[in-house]
């Protein structure tokens, strides 16, 4: 079927399922029709998002399913998704559905050629960022593969073809019809772009105070183009002094405040490595600046530097002009190396996890296969590093400076995770959104390069699952402390899914400066708007409804015995490994049961109150007159 003939009518839906990433999508026909050959009409199988347009459609494609074998059906490609739906051979047979946002696609390859003769040997293979590989077979004689391949390339990798990501079309199409809805969202506190306000978050932490101040020195991003516009810095440091300090730090990422203990004034600050080089250069301003950070905490006369790298890597960086702080040069400073490996090691580790989980597994070698990926070891190192920071700040009341090489990968993992452990606010839905906006987005984690949004450079050495490791670490903590988090597993998986989907503007670009230049706040929709407008499905029913309040500080067990593979994320496409029931569905059932129990308790209380009142009335009536 030609892509330009008999196009299906659109049924745009602003409330289409957020999880259009599920290979067994439950979305049913919404009543619109697909045109088909011979005039046969078929129900539209999914709800179109605002701005979603058909690009190609084929009714004679075979999906080579690794679990059910070849399945014949219809393939639709839009500017947002690839959607395959099988044509059941029997009336009662449920269709097989594959629904993949194009942003999830890492690369597309043709398989087979004109001389291929084997069954299903001619077609397309799709490699995804969410652990899946998809294979579709085409008939050679009708040349259907060519247009499918071209449309996938153009729409999955728009930035490589002078196009724009779907998030812009999605928001632009929604604006004329959703102005009232947006106003309502803002008034209801659901506007995702308003979730994080830097000065308000600093005030929550008690800044400004006698020792710390807020500054907009970087408002034009001229001092450091990968840092936010607003910083919190020691009050003793003048603006000119800060400019000089920035010159001695990689990428000009000087130490600035991430978090402060309101009780002890112990702080977590973040930065990049100092530019000491092989010769061991010193910088008086940088040394003085770290002493300012130490002196801002009256509870301790020491400062701890947590260098995320293995010590060998930190030493090797001296040859490139970087390095680490010398305890001889920086007085009253102790340095610790946390042995977290670089982005290239993590990328390779995740590749091995994918091989172990999808499409097939060997039960007899399962644990060995997972262990050999070293993924859980890396997660353990991140957790252990965060626990060490918590111990210094909370138990020892010592301020901590965190850095790696450039301070936008491992540093963000450590600061964000330790803040989550220290501060119950970040374990709420809104607080976690603030944490991501602050420690990851505003401080310049390079989401565009690490994820590869919309470009076809699948072998780019800058790609790495750094943020995914952080979300995995959060899941590990939530698994150990099941009632400490307001949000559930579905919330975390939704964030990971839309990290790739390019439906929202939240994770686009590399820095705050780039997002401001692209005007994402007005030209795209925030993921948090989407989540906050339908919170119920993301809430943890065990969050302190039946406890006396949130635990102030969490100290997870960071050992190999306690860290486990997150099957709900990595194994969800493998029916032999994933749980038969989705976590979000189970959560909704628990929430519904909880509501019923609360209602029953209130009814019993009301009956008890009425009975007590009736007894008191009867007693007064029976009392003798005096």
Image (cartoon, rainbow, N blue to C red):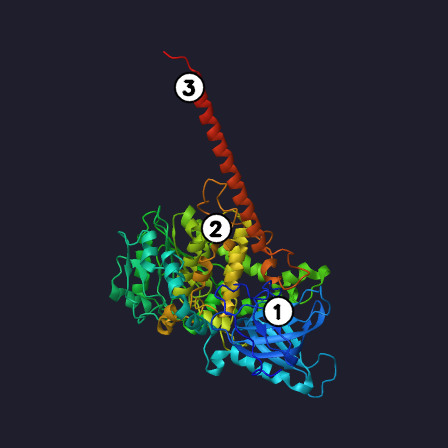
Give x and y (percent) for residue 126: 61, 75
Give x and y (percent) for residue 472: 53, 59
Q: Nearer the viewer, mark 2 or mark 3?
A: 3
Give x and y (percent) for residue 547: 49, 41
Q: Distance between the residues labelled 2 and 3?
A: 48 Å
Residue 336 in view in this figure: no
Mark 2 closeness class: few <14, some 14–19, many ≥20 residues within 10 Å: many
Q: Mark 1 points at which residue?
A: 98
Q: How far apart are marks 2 and 1 (CA)?
A: 31 Å
Q: Are marks 2 and 1 in contact (CB under 8 Å)?
A: no
Give x and y (percent) for residue 394: 41, 48
> In the image as oriented, which residue stretches furthest toward the right?
118
* SS category of the residue bearing label 2: loop
Label located before the other in sequence (3 or 1): 1
- The disc placed on residue 620 is 3
Q: Nearer the viewer, mark 2 or mark 1?
A: 1
Residue 352 in view in this figure: yes
User: What residue lies at 49% left-to-right and 50% top-to-bottom?
Assistant: 485
* SS category of the residue bearing label 3: helix
Quadrant (top left/top right/bottom left/bottom right) for the C terminus = top left
Q: In this view, does 272 lie above or below 486?
A: below
Q: Do the residues labelled 2 and 3 touch (CB within 8 Å)?
A: no
Q: Which of 75 and 266 is in front in this view?
A: 75
User: What residue lies at 52% left-to-right and 81% top-to-bottom?
Assistant: 154
Q: Nearer the viewer, residue 168 or 255?
A: 168
Asked if residue 70 lies left or right of residue 460, the reply is right
Q: Which of 218 and 561 is in front in this view?
A: 218
Mark 1 closeness class: few <14, some 14–19, many ≥20 residues within 10 Å: many
Asked if residue 245 lies left or right of residue 175, the reply is left
Mark 3 closeness class: few <14, some 14–19, many ≥20 residues within 10 Å: few
Quadrant (top left/top right/bottom left/bottom right) for the N terminus = bottom right
Q: Mark 2 points at which residue?
A: 486
């Amino acid at each position: 079927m030609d892509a330009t003939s008999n196009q299906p009518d659109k049924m745009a839906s602003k409330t289409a399922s957020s999880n259009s990433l599920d290979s067994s999508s439950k979305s049913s026909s919404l009543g619109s029709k697909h045109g088909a050959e011979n005039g046969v009409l078929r129900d539209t199988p999914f709800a179109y998002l605002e701005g979603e347009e058909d690009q190609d459609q084929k009714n004679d494609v075979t999906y080579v399913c690794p679990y059910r074998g070849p399945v014949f059906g219809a393939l639709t490609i839009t500017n947002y998704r690839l959607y395959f739906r099988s044509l059941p051979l029997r009336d009662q047979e449920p269709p097989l559905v594959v629904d993949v946002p194009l942003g999830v696609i890492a690369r597309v390859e043709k398989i087979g050629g004109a001389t291929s003769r084997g069954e299903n040997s001619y077609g397309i293979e799709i490699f995804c960022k969410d652990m899946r590989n998809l294979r579709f077979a085409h008939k050679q004689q009708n040349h259907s593969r060519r247009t499918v391949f071209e449309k996938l390339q153009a729409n999955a990798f728009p930035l490589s073809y002078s196009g724009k990501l779907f998030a812009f079309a999605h928001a632009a199409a929604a604006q004329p019809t959703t102005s009232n809805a947006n106003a309502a969202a803002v008034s209801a506190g659901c506007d995702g772009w308003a979730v994080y306000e830097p000065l308000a978050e600093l005030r929550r932490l008690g800044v400004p105070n006698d020792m710390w101040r807020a500054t907009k020195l970087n408002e034009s991003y001229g001092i450091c183009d990968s840092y936010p516009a607003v910083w919190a810095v020691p009050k003793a440091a003048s603006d000119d002094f800060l400019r000089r300090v920035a010159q001695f730090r990689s990428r000009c990422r000087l130490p600035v405040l991430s978090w402060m203990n309101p009780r002890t004034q112990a702080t977590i600050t973040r930065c990049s490595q100092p530019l000491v080089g092989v010769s061991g250069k010193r910088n008086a301003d940088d040394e003085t600046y770290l002493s300012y950070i130490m002196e801002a905490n009256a509870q301790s006369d020491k400062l701890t530097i947590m260098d995320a790298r293995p010590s060998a890597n930190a030493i090797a960086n001296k040859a490139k002009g970087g390095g680490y702080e010398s305890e001889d040069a920086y007085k009253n400073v102790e340095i610790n190396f946390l042995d977290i490996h670089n982005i290239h090691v993590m990328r390779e580790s995740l590749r091995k996890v994918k091989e172990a989980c999808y499409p097939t597994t060997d039960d007899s070698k399962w644990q060995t296969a997972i262990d050999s990926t070293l993924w859980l070891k890396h997660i353990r190192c991140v957790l252990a590093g965060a626990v060490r920071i918590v111990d210094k700040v909370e138990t020892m009341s010592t301020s901590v400076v965190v850095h790696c090489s450039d301070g936008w990968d491992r540093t963000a993992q450590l600061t964000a995770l330790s803040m989550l452990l220290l501060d119950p606010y970040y374990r709420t839905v809104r607080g976690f959104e603030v944490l991501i906006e602050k420690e990851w987005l505003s401080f310049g984690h390079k989401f565009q390069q690490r994820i590869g949004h919309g470009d076809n450079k699948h072998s780019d050495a800058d790609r790495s699952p750094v943020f995914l490791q952080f979300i995995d670490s959060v899941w590990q903590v939530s698994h150990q402390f099941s009632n400490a988090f307001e949000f559930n597993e579905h919330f975390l998986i939704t964030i990971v899914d839309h990290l790739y989907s390019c439906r929202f503007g939240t994770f686009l670009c590399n820095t705050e400066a780039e997002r401001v230049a692209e005007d994402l706040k007005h030209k795209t929709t925030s993921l948090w708007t989407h989540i906050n407008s339908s919170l119920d499905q993301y809430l943890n029913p065990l969050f302190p409804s039946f406890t006396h309040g949130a635990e102030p500080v969490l100290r997870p067990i960071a050992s190999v015995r306690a860290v486990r593979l997150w099957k709900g994320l990595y194994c969800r496409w493998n029916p032999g490994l994933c749980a038969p029931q989705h976590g979000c569905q189970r959560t909704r059932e628990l929430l519904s049961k909880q509501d019923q129990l609360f209602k029953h308790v209130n009814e019993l209380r009301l009956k008890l109150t009425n009975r007590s009142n009736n007894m008191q009335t009867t007693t007064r009536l029976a009392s003798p007159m005096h």
